[in-house]
Amino acid sequence: MIEISNLTKKYESGKIALDNISFSINPGEICGYIGTNGAGKTTTIKIITGALEFDSGSVIVSNLDVKIKPVEVKKVTGYVPESGNIFNSLTTQDYLLFVCGIRNIDNSITKKRTDYFAELFDYKDFLNSSIGNLSKGTKQKVLITSALIHNPEIILLDEPLNGLDANTIFIFQDMIKALSEKGKTIFYCSHLLDMIEKISSKLLIIDNGRIKLDSTANELKATDNYAGLENLFKNLKNESEYKKFVYEDIFN
């Protein structure tokens, strides 16, 4: 479970990234977290991981206070960052061995899980290749593997589909659903509204550091005049806030 209460984060520039937000995500839920660039999505997820400090409020992850027990929180979470930095000089195999070593995973289990994910995501031929020589999509597959290989209770995903091909996206989608059925708490940040709508059981929309929508997917779809997440997202802003391309304004 993730419980956020009255969370506020201000940057040194004076910008309020998160303005007293509160929400909770239960075990087994896939929570889609959407918003425009700069709305506060990545800030939220970094705070949950313990990678970023905050000014006020509380963040509880699997009954652990992030401020008091940040190391314990990291043990129960798996995190796919928006732009992951992997040790490019290591081979894929060595990197995953390194991750499993930090997680204190037994050698036999390490091999079993490494081989399984390499087969699932079709990168077994690159286990002995340097990560720096991998394609963007293959690096992303390795990053996802490293986030899940210790079987975490809490899964935090920040634009996890970057660079992935269509087939891997289908596999990933099915995998996330299967993990939620096993009781994993999944917090999924993305700009891909169709994917979010398809797999999420709970939806949060953040805008300028404030939560504008907090609803289960079923409750949302049952409301009058619901015409899809894309339309709902657009309607949260005033028409005057949207910029529109007009061909004649530039090419006439």
Image (cartoon, grey):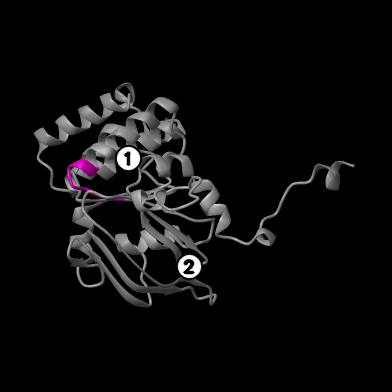
Counting from the top left corner in percent of width and height, residue 197 is at: 42, 43
The C terminus: image quadrant: top right
Q: CA distance from mark 1 to mark 2?
A: 27 Å
Viewed as shown, does residue 56 lie left or right of 106? Answer: right
Viewed as shown, does residue 246 lie left or right of 149? Answer: right
Looking at the image, is mark 1 or mark 2 earlier in the sequence?
Answer: 1
Query: Residue 40: which disc?
Result: none
Residue nearer the viewer, 252 or 136:
252
Q: Is residue 251 magenta?
A: no
Tell me which residue sits at (39%, 39%) in the image: 198
Q: Nearer the viewer, mark 1 or mark 2?
A: 2
The amino acid sitting under disc 1 is: Ile
Residue 243: quadrant of the picture:
bottom right
Counting from the top left corner in percent of width and height, residue 217 is at: 36, 49
Tell me which residue sits at (30%, 64%) in the image: 50
Image mark count: 2
Pointer 1: residues within 10 angstroms few (<14), some, or many (20+)?
Answer: many
Tell me which residue sits at (35%, 41%) in the image: 199
Viewed as shown, does residue 82 lie left or right of 118? Answer: right
Q: What residue does disc 1 label?
A: 144
Name, please, the residue furthest toward the top: 125
Image: magenta residue range: 180-186
At mark 2, the secondary structure is loop
Residue nearer the viewer, 39 or 164:
39
Q: What residue does disc 2 label?
A: 209
Residue 47 visible at all: yes
Name, please, the residue furthest toward the right: 252
Tell me which residue sits at (31%, 62%) in the image: 48
